[in-house]
Image (spheres, rainbow, N blue to C red):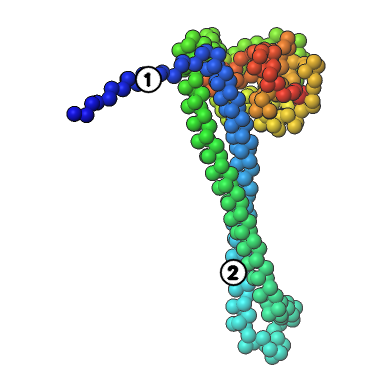
Amino acid sequence: MTASLAYPPVLAHAEPKPTRAQVQKKLDRLNEQMDHKVEQYNQLNEKLKIAKKKYDGARKSSAQEQAAFEEQRSKIAQMAATAYKNGDSADVTGFVGSKDPQAILDQAAVFSHLSHERNSQLTQFLATAQRLRREEAQAKTAYDDVKAKNKELQDQKRKLQLEVDKQKKLLAKLGGGSSSGGGGGVGGTYTGPASGPARLALQFAYAQQRKPYAWGATGPNSYDCSGLTMKAWAAAGVNITRTTNSQWAATKRVAKSDLQPGDLVFFSGLSHVGMYVGNGQMIHAPSTGKVVTVVSINSSYYASNYYGAGRP
């Protein structure tokens, strides 16, 4: 008889539960990745608008040139038909018998023009029409390419959002759920010292408090970070463009020690922007699941990810 060997039972070791600090750190990292994706999306969306405008313009030009080509071709065909019909009488005897010598001369000039220019005119119109159709095709290809990249980025964004939501739920279970802005109605009033356009911009931003963040949104019911700052300064009559990168380029550099209310403050490699309100605070649209709110730029996260500031 063969003796059976007894093996000790294998004990399953459960993965240690992450701490609240670990979950928060991962959530911060995911939100930073999300900021980068949103900025990429906003930039691509602006390119998509431009590509769509070019494509529509190319289609319109091509259609107009095609219509002009058909009209000219019809006119020349009619003139050619008339010349053919009158060919037998277009000799000296026919011309002499006319009571309108000038009309004969004009008609002769038309016939001569037709014989020499008809082909070149048609060729020119055809070449133009073909060029515009080619430009239309190129514009459509460019538009379709940007549109495909836009869709791909949206898909990436949705997958990342699932990870963010997962970490938020886990953080909530550990008793550290991030605030979505608290109760109370939407809106607020700026009472700080800013004046002129900066005051108007801040008044607009404060009126958006507790409205939800939504990536790609520019109001009026929700905003992403650069959507809020763009609309706030637009309310003051100042165009600072759409994306964080373009807003950085459109503003004057300001040292952190010289910040004034209304200045834009940038974080995480230009993937996030807020508006300085004074006393080391900014108003901003933070991230998915949160609302427009005022926070300190000297908190550990924003202090460590501070990039720079710009004045419109």
Q: Secondary structure at mark 1?
A: loop
Instruction: Report which residue position mark 1 lands on.
Output: 12
Furthest residue toward left: 1
Q: Amino acid at mark 1?
A: Ala
> 269 or 121, which is in the foreground?
269
Q: Of callouts 1 and 2, which one flags the residue occurring earlier in the amino acid sequence?
A: 1
Residue at (75% x, 23% y) in the render: 309
User: Residue 266, can we see it?
Assistant: yes
Q: Callout 2 environment at 10 Å: few (<14), some (14 to 19), or many (20+)?
A: few
> 91 or 284, which is in the foreground?
284
Q: Amino acid at mark 2?
A: Ser
Whether residue 126 sits left or right of residue 249 in the image: it is left
> Which of the 4 image quarters holds residue 64?
bottom right
Q: Callout 1 environment at 10 Å: few (<14), some (14 to 19), or many (20+)?
A: few
> 51 or 39, which is in the foreground?
39
Q: Is residue 140 above or below residue 97?
A: above
Q: CA distance from mark 1 to mark 2?
A: 87 Å
Furthest residue toward front: 1
Image quarter of the C terminus: top right
Number of numbered callouts drawn = 2
Question: x%, y% of residue 125?
Answer: 65, 66
Instruction: Report which residue position mark 2 lands on.
Output: 74
